[in-house]
Amino acid sequence: MLTATYKKQELVFKEAGGTSRGVLETKPSWFIKIENNQGIFGIGECSIIPGLSMDDSLELDVIIADVCTNINDYVQDYHQHLKDVPALRFAIETALKGLQVKHPYELYPSQFTSGNEPIVINGLIWMGEAETMLKRIEEKLKQGFSCLKLKVGAIDFNEELRLLRHIRNRYSEKDLELRLDANGAFSPVEALSKLEALSSFKIHSIEQPIEAGQYEDMFQLCRKTTIPIALDEELIGVNDMSAKAELLRLIMPQYIILKPSLLGGVMASDEWISIADELNIGWWATSALEANIGLNAIAQWVATKNSSLRQGLGTGQVFTNNLRSPLYLKGQELYYNPHGNWENPFEANDG
């Protein structure tokens, strides 16, 4: 028999995070612990992004409480029972994985968890006023990042072009890889012309230029674009393997972005990868503002994939009250210290 408990934490941003959906100063996460009769436990994180996650519901607390109370009824088929709450699925998946391994936080052994090999990541630049963004860009470059991801679509487009022009005047394509994320900010009518304007700055890729669900428009964009397009929000809520294959075959993007908290966990993300590989579509993984519990699971999973692309796993640094963990950044490299200590979010409750 298993028992499950949960604890909610409001994560506080060091600096307000600007997205196309507004500015975030805090966001919630729920830590879920599943324990067996021998006292062996695993911990997962249910992390949502207000306004984006499918799980963003006033009833989420009730759902989590019910799942924890009746955990033995859920564990056999939780991927199906919880298909509409993907962040909770990921949390349950992570916690159950922790029960199966020697150490509850070392989920997917690799050279990364041994401390021998880092994961190379991109630097994330939040949306904001042009001068503020420029200052953040300079800070990331001084820290040693050679790939930056910029959120676009929230400020004046000409200002964004000016910002990119300034960057490219100082750093060539060889010195700095630029990725953009529009979060669906462009309209289908204007998207192609905006992509053409952006392409002069040698952009690696752009995530979700138009809102999800406009399949024909997205297909045409992917076919005509001068910048490789990566699907992000487009993947949310697509659960069946056949539906995933149909979506990718219909749109044929250049890349897909995998966020386990938004897609239903590692198993669900692996399904996307298997289809993408068949269709010769590239991919990389991105954390979705998880605390270190969720970030750790994503990083360890990604490390087993031996991907040559930079991953989007730098968001563990953005909170003032994140859990202490063996994860640490050295420049653009994310490391795991196998001798480091974890802060158990339940330790206060455990007495």
Image: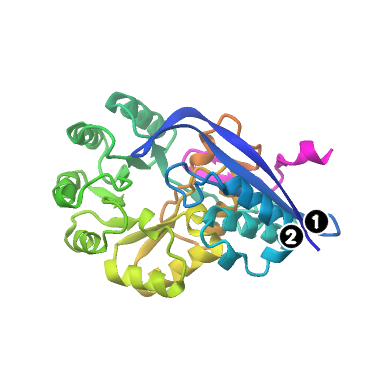
Q: How is the image coloured?
A: rainbow
Q: Quadrant of the C terminus?
A: top right
Of the numbered discs in the image, which one, if any, rests on residue 217? none
Q: Position of residue 144 (x, y in %)?
A: 43, 37
Q: Quadrant of the N terminus?
A: bottom right
- The quarter holding residue 350 reads top right
Q: How many callouts does the rendering have? A: 2
Sequence-earlier tag: 2 or 1 = 1
Amino acid type shown at disc 1: Ile
Q: Which residue is at 36% across, 43% downward?
A: 149
Secondary structure under badge 1?
Answer: loop
Asked whether disc 2 touches disc 1, contact meaning CB atoms under 8 Å apart, the reply is: yes
Task: Relative to 245, say whether 19 is above or below.
Answer: above
Residue for badge 1 = 40
- The quarter holding residue 122 reads top left
Of the numbered discs in the image, which one, if any, rests on residue 99? 2
Circle 2 packing at 10 Å, graded few (<14), some (14-19), many (20+), is many
Q: Which residue is at 27% across, 44% downward?
A: 185
Q: Nearer the viewer, residue 162 or 89?
A: 89
Q: Which residues are magenta?
A: 329-351
Secondary structure under badge 2?
Answer: helix
Q: Position of residue 332 (x, y in %)?
A: 46, 42
Q: Nearer the viewer, residue 159 or 308?
A: 159
Residue 348 belongs to the span the image colors magenta: yes
